[in-house]
Image (tube, helix red, strand yellow):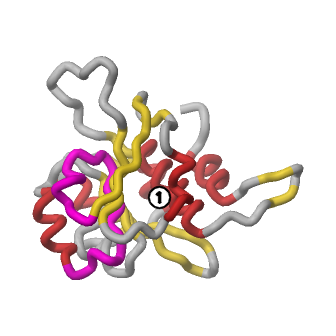
Amino acid sequence: MTYTLTTVLLSLVLCTNGGKAAPVSEYRIKAAFVYNFAKFVEWPTDPLPSPSPPAPFVIGILGKDPFGTEIEVLEGKRLRNRNLMIIRSDTIEELMNADVLFISASIKGRLTQVLERLNHRPVLTVSDTPGFAQGGVMINLYTQANKIRFEINPRVAERAGLKISSHLLRLARIVAE
């Protein structure tokens, strides 16, 4: 990788316009975090030959979408040598093939069922709801001192066959179930 994790995460927060910082919404920053998390996670290799052209890299949003149009800037970008696609749904069944799954706060009452349905599939789960990392979500965004930070539950990721970069782990607050 030609850039460091620090540079990537710093670029999430800074948005310049003529040398001056432009205000960036909370969910635009969180969308950038979600996008960049995928760059620091290794998925298990697929033993089957990849289709030509490759399937899109899917970021699924489960439940009420807190991003609105802020995540649309990612649509069509390349991620892991695949075109990125955003899919929204209220049901996990429609998002079973997502590579990254953002689980919104509106799913709070169904979190256990959603995670059981994923059944340790190699899907990077992300949220921004207090307690979700302890409840089995892999990466949870939170705000501390007016800064967006993240916590990681590495055991859940390991069980799903995902390997989170040590660089990302060093920047995170580590939690357990």
Question: SS at mark 1?
Answer: helix
How many numbered discs sit on the rendered protein? Answer: 1
- Residue 12 lies in quadrant: bottom right
Rendering coords of residue 14 (x, y %)? 71, 57
- Residue 125 lies in quadrant: bottom left
- Residue 153 lies in quadrant: bottom left
| Region rendered in magenta | 90-109
| Residue 106 on the magenta span | yes
Horizontal side of 83 relative to 22 (left or right) equals left
In the image, residue 131 sits, relative to residue 176, either above or below, namely below
Rendering coords of residue 170 (x, y %)? 47, 58
| Residue 23 on the magenta span | no
Rendering coords of residue 61 (x, y %)? 35, 59
In the image, residue 163 sits, relative to residue 80, either above or below, namely below
Quadrant in which the C terminus is drawn: bottom left
User: Residue at 23% of width from left, 60% of height from top?
Assistant: 155
User: Residue at 74% of width from left, 66% of height from top?
Assistant: 23
Horizontal side of 62 relative to 116 (left or right) equals right
Q: Within 10 Å of the Cα at label 1, are there few (<14), some (14-19), or many (20+) other Cα atoms?
A: few
- The residue that mark 1 highlights is 170
User: Residue at 43% of width from left, 39% of height from top?
Assistant: 84
